[in-house]
Image (cartoon, helix red, strand yellow):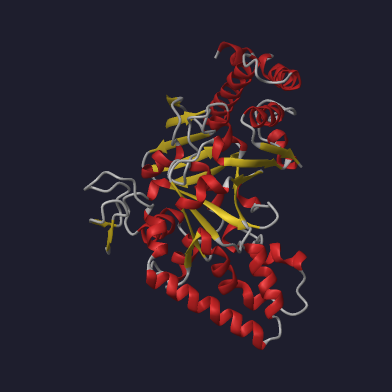
Amino acid sequence: MDPNPCEHCAQEIPLDLTNCPHCGHGLICPNVRLASQSKERDALERRFNAAIVDAASRGCEKTVQEFEAAVRNSQAVLGSTLEKLMPIVNRDRDVFATFHDLSELRFLRESSVAGPDWNIARPSAESALLGSRKHIEKLHYAALALDGRSLPHYGELTIRLRENLISSRVSLFQENSAVYVHRHGVTFPEGSRAIWEERHKLCVAKLAGKITKSTGADEFSTILLQKGATAVDDQFVEVLVFGAMTFATFEKVTVRRSTSKASSKSSKRPRPRRGTANERALLNYCKIYKTECELV
Amino acid sequence: MQVVLSGRACVALLKDGGTWNSIHYEEIDRLVTRQPEEFDVLFAGVRDLDWIEVASIDEVRDRLADAVDSAEALNLVLYLCDNRLSAETLHAAARELEELVVYAEIVDS
């Protein structure tokens, strides 16, 4: 693993530490440090420039520039179930569960026999994104979005994250990293990840080829984030958030009401009202914590 | 058959000889093949584990439904005790709880 200097004391430190062993100063998160390496940023810059040149040759440079301007303001959103969120909603010190905390995510994703074994692909991807296995239990996953929508395979809630609480600890990968590892192995090509401030370059490098002269601005959100038939088929730019998240990290929660569990037919006891109190309680707690909430 | 179940996690893990399966409340008729090392993942973060011996799969489904409904009834009672929640929410919690308290086994638990 490449050594890096501590920003505080300038002593060299390994990438997988979160505090400097020499001065104790907090360090930039490992995923951000890896995405910040000059070889990564230079490679991303080359991909970005090549995408712009290609767009100019196709006569759609202006439209790609408009797309670039839009994704500069993109937000990190994640999908969740009410069951995952509710335990932290009324306790501001509880933290949001990660992949390694949580069973539901794994079982939601075991969608096909031919699909990835998430128990292998996800930790392998995390090791590559962090440079070691040391902190893999500290990663949360989100996606970049322009219109506040998330991917529906992960639950009935869409949670938009507060930019000022995540931007310093976020890195991005150009697609679902676990699916990438399943298909291509654990070596990520240089220039396929980015820091938050350069997410527009990653989006343009990946997606400019999908933009033509006739592409309208209203199509940008679907170009950036597209729901697939299953979670494996979803197309998005992955946002990796290092470290804990609490309810205060959430800027807005949107609940899709149509997926209420009241329709569960196999329940021993008929419960047509099941879940209604959870939804209303969520609205109340959002108000208490000044988190925007919407039922749709 | 040995079973571990959790109302909070909405899941039961079954060991029948060398075979491991799980049953999930939302798809209670489906039996999912498991490995013992998946225990931590299935029950991550929950403390309401119940270890029981049962004779049939149907009994597991029955006990799991009891555990989930009991856990959710407790949640609803906690909502009713939270004076920060709106009258509308408390009303919804009370109506939802009414669906459960008619069952003696839920009240007893």
Which residue is located at x 71 percent, y 41 percent? A259
* Location of the C terminus of chain A (image quadrant): top right
Q: Quadrant of residue A42?
A: bottom left
Please state the horizontal and vertical placement of residue A30, each as a whole percent of the image: 36, 55
Q: Farthest residue toward the bottom?
A: A57
* Location of the N terminus of chain A (image quadrant): bottom left
Q: Quadrant of residue A48?
A: bottom right
Residue A119 can be seen, yes or no? yes
B87 on left or right of A184: right
A212 on left or right of A155: right
Please state the horizontal and vertical placement of residue A55, each as a whole percent of the image: 65, 82
Please state the horizontal and vertical placement of residue A182, each as a whole percent of the image: 45, 65
Q: Quadrant of residue A80?
A: top right
Of residues A139 and B67, which is closer to you in this image?
A139
Which residue is located at x 43 percent, y 30 percent? B4
The total number of labels drawn is: 0
A18 on left or right of A197: left
Please state the horizontal and vertical placement of residue A59, each as a whole percent of the image: 71, 85
Which residue is located at x 68 percent, y 52 percent? A149
Residue A113 can be seen, yes or no? no
Image height of A115 relative to B83, above or below: below
Image height of B38 relative to B6, above or below: below
Of residues A240 and A162, which is closer to you in this image?
A162
